[in-house]
């Protein structure tokens, strides 16, 4: 299908690439259909573009790029709402705020976007970790990663997938090293 956007012009989007946010994004609850745009500009920044509102698009990035130890802990109800059976099927992104002074760029680490890659069901989930910031200054970390990544292979930064764990209602954390859901409660 063809979708007109104010930022990227007319784009051809396959129906299988449409992501459904049942509850919308925070502050944009009325918008539930989105797709990911990679502008191909080598910045590592992607965009989540609304299907229904041509002018609504948010820059986002995989947090593992600038914060390798970033961890998302999901409650069983959150996993169920995403229809996640295997954590390998999830992609995690953080929405960016990019002001005119780009060095003041920040990422919302407190409320990441979690996408089930198989079903294309997604949610922006507010994490319970009080140490995470809504406006995490990350420009220096991103720049450091880009410099290391484009340098010689022998000094390339090692990046691992963000850890995802389930949390029982009693806040006991269960981490599965195979990144599969642990069916034990």
Image: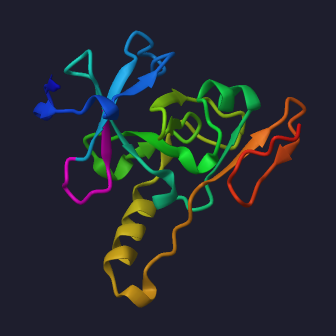
Q: Which residue is drawn at 72% across and 25% down?
A: 77
Give the quadrant of residue 6: top left
Q: Where is residue 103 in the image (x, y as percent from the top left)?
A: 34, 53
Q: Position of residue 32 (x, y in %)?
A: 40, 17
Residue 45 highlighted magenta (yes or no): yes
Residue extending farthest to the left is 9
Residue 156 highlighted magenta (yes or no): no
Q: Which residue is drawn at 83% across and 48% down?
A: 174
- Quick one: quadrant of the C terminus? top right
Q: Nearer the viewer, residue 87 or 58?
A: 87
Asked if residue 37 can be seen in this view, the reply is yes
Residue extending farthest to the top is 30
Q: Which residue is drawn at 85% across and 29% down?
A: 169
Q: Position of residue 130 (x, y in %)?
A: 71, 38
- Quick one: quadrant of the N terminus? top left
Q: Is residue 120 left or right of residue 3?
A: right
Q: Is residue 13 left or right of residue 181?
A: left
Where 47 sits versus 104, above or below?
Answer: above
Where 105 sits versus 50, above or below?
Answer: below
Q: Where is residue 15 in the image (x, y as percent from the top left)?
A: 28, 28
Q: In this view, does 169 lie to the left or right of 41?
A: right
Labels in figure, total:
0
Q: Which residue is drawn at 56% across and 33% down?
A: 111
Give the quadrant of residue 150: bottom left
Instruction: Specify start and end residues of the magenta stretch as a single range.
Output: 39-48
Q: Nearer the viewer, residue 56 or 87?
A: 87
Q: In this view, does 149 lie to the left or right of 41?
A: right
- Provide the major secondary structure of the magenta segment: loop
């Amino acid at each position: 299908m063809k979708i007109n956007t104010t930022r990227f012009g007319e784009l051809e989007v396959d129906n299988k690439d449409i992501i459904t946010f049942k509850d919308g994004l925070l502050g944009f609850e009325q918008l539930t259909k989105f797709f990911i745009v990679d502008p191909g500009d080598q910045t590592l920044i992607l965009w989540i573009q609304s299907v229904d509102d041509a002018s609504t698009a948010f820059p986002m990035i995989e947090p593992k790029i600038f914060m390798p130890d970033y961890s998302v802990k999901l409650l069983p109800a959150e996993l169920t709402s995403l229809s996640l059976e295997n954590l390998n099927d999830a992609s995690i992104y953080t929405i960016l705020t990019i002001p005119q002074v780009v060095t003041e760029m920040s990422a919302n680490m407190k409320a990441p976007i979690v996408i089930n890659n198989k079903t294309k069901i997604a949610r922006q989930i507010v994490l319970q970790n009080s140490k995470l910031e809504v406006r995490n200054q990350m420009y220096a970390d991103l720049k450091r990663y880009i410099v290391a990544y484009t340098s010689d292979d022998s000094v390339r930064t090692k990046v691992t997938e963000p850890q995802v764990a389930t949390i029982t209602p009693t806040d006991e954390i269960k981490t599965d090293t195979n990144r599969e859901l642990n069916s034990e409660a």
